[in-house]
Amino acid sequence: MELNTRAVHVINEPFTEGSWPLSVPLVQSSAFAFESADELAGAMAGPDGRYVYGRRGNPTVRALERTLAGLEGGAGAIAFASGMGAISGVLLALLRPGDRVVAQRCLYGGTHAVLADLAERYGVEVVRISGDDPAELAAAAVHPATRVLVLETIANPTGQVPDLPGLLAAARALGVTSLVDNSLASPVLCRPLELGADIVVHSTTKYLSGHSDVLGGAAVFADDELRLRVWPRTVELGACADPFAAWLTLRGIPTLPLRMREHCANAAALAELLAGHPAVTAVHHPWRPDHPSYAMARKVLAGGGGLLSFELAGGREAGRAFIERVRVARLALSLGGVETLVTHPASTSHRELDEGELAAAGIGAGLVRMSVGIEDAGDLWADVEQALA
Ligand SMILES: *Cc1c(COP(=O)(O)O)cnc(C)c1O
């Protein structure tokens, strides 16, 4: 079935004899009772048997895992407490001291921090590549212990779309496990497993749940053998999804395709208007022909996504003033929810950096990031215009 049908018909097991609850039940229990010792012992074998204890599995969490596997076209999934739980859990499960990771240079800050920590404290070597050229991966993977390739479908705040088909094919040929963070695209805009990825990770906090009311993460696996290898490590780590968080995420998923359509349309409309405004010197959105990833975006994405960034001629002061003057959009750090959010990295998340360091990170002093919501596009533009004025 098509993705918008799969999103509405989330996986739901029969709950009582003879009929199904239409919505997935919230099973808010940390443990499950058995009749016999043998049955309990037998249920401890793996992730797919009877429910034993919440860290090893829960019916609501399993419904989310199966739904996400269905949306991404994977063999199975593991749900986590957050996107960072998923990223840390998968990397810790796959890597040992002496291994090499090849990572796209422009990655989510939390992923950068995990990789830096793995390098500094656990002896994992991290090699950076641009993400635009599969030859860079081949060169980095001459090291025999090259284990994992880390990419993002749409990077933030630049909107870079790496050469997913080229890099994922190269990783497969080289025997390197590929991991793609698909949080910004969601399975509506891209399904990296269909392009050859081994693992897709999500911050379900963002578009999948979509309402800024829950933290969550997930890893979806192309191959079930890999999921079964990662699962015991994640049970040890304990960054498991809570049933209520899983339930809230499932509550968001049926409207994901509708929401993504609005996020993409509003972001494209705002990007066009911003590009024509005299206070704006550059607009970064992968659906625009002047974006460096335009050709790749049109090839691998079904839409440009809801995240855009733009640079203000007035620099640092103008960026700070803008985020404090918007009235419909809100000043907040997250993204992917129904409401429009703005941040100004130079005066918030990256305020410790001077102009030179900001430039090296590819962030202009006047750069504003906008997670475009599903409000009326005219109201959003009126708000942006008054804040720019
Ligand atoms: C937010 C985000 C994360 C981290 O997810 P949390 O749910 O906040 O832990 C990871 N990757 C990307 C691309 C994100 O936007």
Image: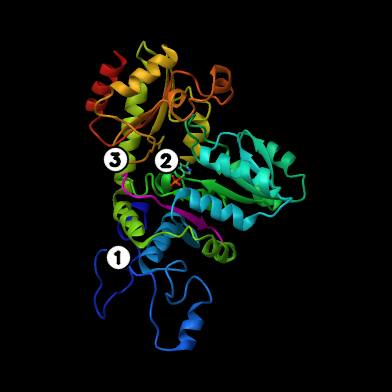
> Within the magenta stretch, is there residue 89?
no
**Mark in the foreground, 1 or 2:** 1
Q: Amino acid at mark 3?
A: Val
User: Which quarter of the figure has residue 5?
Assistant: bottom left
* First-in-chain label (1 vs 2): 1
Q: Nearer the viewer, mark 3 or mark 1?
A: 1
Marker count (numbered): 3
| Residue placed under numbered mark 2 in the picture | 302
Residue under label 1, please give it: 26
Closer to us: 239 or 86: 239
Image location of residue 285, percent across then percent down: 43, 28
Labels 3 and 1: the sequence-earlier one = 1
Q: Residues within 10 Å of mark 2 (few under 14, many from 20)?
A: some
Q: Which residues are magenta?
A: 212-223
Q: Position of residue 33 (x, y in %)?
A: 38, 80
Q: Residue at x 41, y 55 (%)?
A: 71
C-alpha gap between disc 3 and disc 1: 24 Å
- Say what amino acid the circle numbered 2 marks: Ala
Q: Quadrant of the N terminus?
A: bottom left
Q: Is mark 2 within 8 Å of ligand 1?
A: no
- Which label sits on residue 17? none
Q: Position of residue 314 (x, y in %)?
A: 41, 11
The residue wearing badge 3 is 338
Label 3 secondary element: loop
Q: CA distance from mark 1 to mark 2?
A: 33 Å
279 sits left or right of 44 in the view? left
Q: Disc 1, disc 2: CB below 8 Å? A: no
- The verdict on residue 220 being magenta is yes
Mark 1: few, some, or many residues within 10 Å (few <14, many ≥20)?
some
Residue 164 appears in the picture as rendered: no
